[in-house]
Image: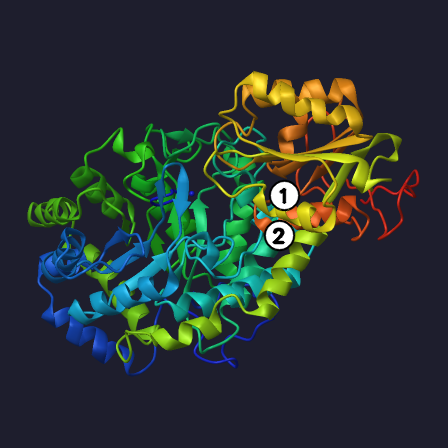
Amino acid sequence: MFVLRLGCALIGFSLLLFPQTRAREASPRKTTAGKGTASEPAQVSRWMQSLSLHDRIAQLIVIPFYGDNPSARSKAYRRFAAEVRQTRVGGMILVNRSENGLVKYAEPTAAAAFLNRMQKLARIPLIVGGDFERGVSMRVASATKFPHSMAFAAASDVEAVRQLGAVTARESRAIGVQWVFAPVADVNNNPDNPIINIRAFSENPDEVAKYVTAFIDGARSDPRYKVLVTAKHFPGHGDTNVDTHAGLGKVDASRERLEKLELVPFRAAIADGVDSIMTAHLWAPAIESRKIPATVSAAVLTGLLRKELKFHGIITTDAMDMEGLRKQFTSGEAAVRAIEAGADVLLMPPYPEAAVKAVVAAVRSGRITRKRIDESVEKILRAKVRLGLDRRRVVDLEAIGDELGTEEDNKLARRVASEAVTLVRNEGGLAPLASPARTCWYALSESRYGQQGRTLMSALQERLPGAKRALLDPMMPMAELEEAAKLAESCDVSVVAAFAGFRGSGELSENFMNFVKLLEARKPLILVGMGNPYLLRAFPEVKAYLATFSTVPDSELAMMDALMGDAAIQGRLPVTIPGIAKYGDGLKVAQKSRGSLTEGSTLR
């Protein structure tokens, strides 16, 4: 799941039970959503006895919140209070919203304070989730700003992914979140995928499996920070041309191909004891003959995931307000079908109370058995006990600052961003730059209102105050871009840092495309793909190309250091760029070795 309002590990009890690193077992590890301690059944039994049918079903509902801490008299607060006290939902998920095209991140203390208030209102403690694929900073300001998943693979750093899992668990628990909707287990083998891209680790299923299990192991490495970990999006979202936020996706692969590719990371995650798996709103005709999303397919969730793959943990839907599901079913019918198919948790149904009532009606009509409901409810309640929520459900607001964005964690994020920088092409030895001061630097932002490129511009002002530079946005008319291109006439080389994330086609605007071609015709040009590594397909004649696999500020600094010769270039492609570069390619350049790149130094 990945929506801006969205989005696409109940940790072990002790280091003895779940050590940080352990050999792969032949049979699946016990998930924290499975059977529990001796004291656990008693608490679960007490809760179950106190719940009506309506309240049991409500325990399967997770609603979104934005991380604000509204006044008790506000309409927003009253709505949330009603969902918790009257609908009696079982959980919440922290999501972002967009204002004027700019993503608004939650302030950690405000988000935690709000959750504390909601926890005090709840009869049974809430389980709280977050889409933390690249750490808590995906949703929360001041948390450690890790690069995207693909950057870790480009850096070939398994241990860093393990540390990412550990940091994510610690920062999550600090703000009152116990359910991490990560890692992404999708294999991005489709360059035209409009929603996964750099959110995935690689196009290689074995490599994805390696990083997925590293994240799981890291997240459960410290028993002080117990969280649920989620592999997503089952049965695999890496080979689709449709963004399931907008419509029904399709993985048109044979069962044999699914076994060899899409299912490999999920099998590894299950063997490693992953706590939950998130469904995808896409159709897999090799498994399900009807044209329906996996989220509501018994063949996918019960037949494949439960029976064949032997997964006994929590199955959560992807966000149920996504069009990949809503275009086919009403909120109530989607909820009923998901439970029928085998889902345990209904994530973000558009109308929570309507979803509960629809499932209640389905039980009373005999369409769904009470036993089926109780199986899912007991899983959720056991998880809450394992997380310690029956003993302590609120967090210490004053301690948050000590846990988020520590210098050690930020250092790790910077290192990964630096190690990920990959030199895909370097005709004429343009990189590193022979004369950074005589270089024109351009940043092409995806949004007029965002922060993309600002870190680069500030760093250039500090380190190369005389260098020509320009931050451009996609709303600029071509006349203004042509004027900006004139800066290059007095430069030896132009560097274009083009931001293209994982959404949509991953291509630049038409004006930006023309701008890059205009620069390319005037002087030697180094194109830097800030995010989407497939960007080079649109500029096959460019002389030099770097990829960062992320759009975070540290990636801006990393690419600048690499081009200036202040950092080694050592990344490798985790994906193939069709017709241009192969999986594993990457030209290696030593630190400060300006122009010393030799033939045959491609990494394999």
Give the number of the mark in front: 2 or 1: 1
**Residue to which mark 2 is pinned:** 554
> Horizontal placement of 147 versus 224: left or right?
right
Please say whether residue 540 is visible from this viewpoint: no
Q: Locate the C terminus by quadrant.
A: top right
Classify residue 44 as left or right of residue 31.
left
Closer to the camera in the image, 539 or 285: 539
Q: Secondary structure at mark 1?
A: helix
* Mark 1, residue position: 457
- Asked where in the image residue 333 lies, by quadrant, the reply is top left
List x then y, in percent, for residue 270: 48, 58
Please tell me which residue lies in front, 133 or 204: 133
Query: In terms of image quadrants, where is residue 13?
Result: bottom left
For the residue marked with disc 2, what is the amino acid? Asp
Q: Is residue 284 visible?
A: yes
Provide residue 372's location: percent of width, then percent of height.
21, 55
Q: How many marks?
A: 2
* Image position of 166 with respect to 57: above or below: below
> Which residue lies at the image location 22% right of the left edge and 60% below the top edge?
90
- Of labels 2 and 1, earlier in sequence is 1
> Which dot marks residue 103?
none
Mark 1 crowdedness (10 Å alpha carbons): few <14, some 14-19, many ≥20: many
Where residue 555 appears, x then y in whole percent?
A: 63, 48
Secondary structure category for the residue under label 2: helix
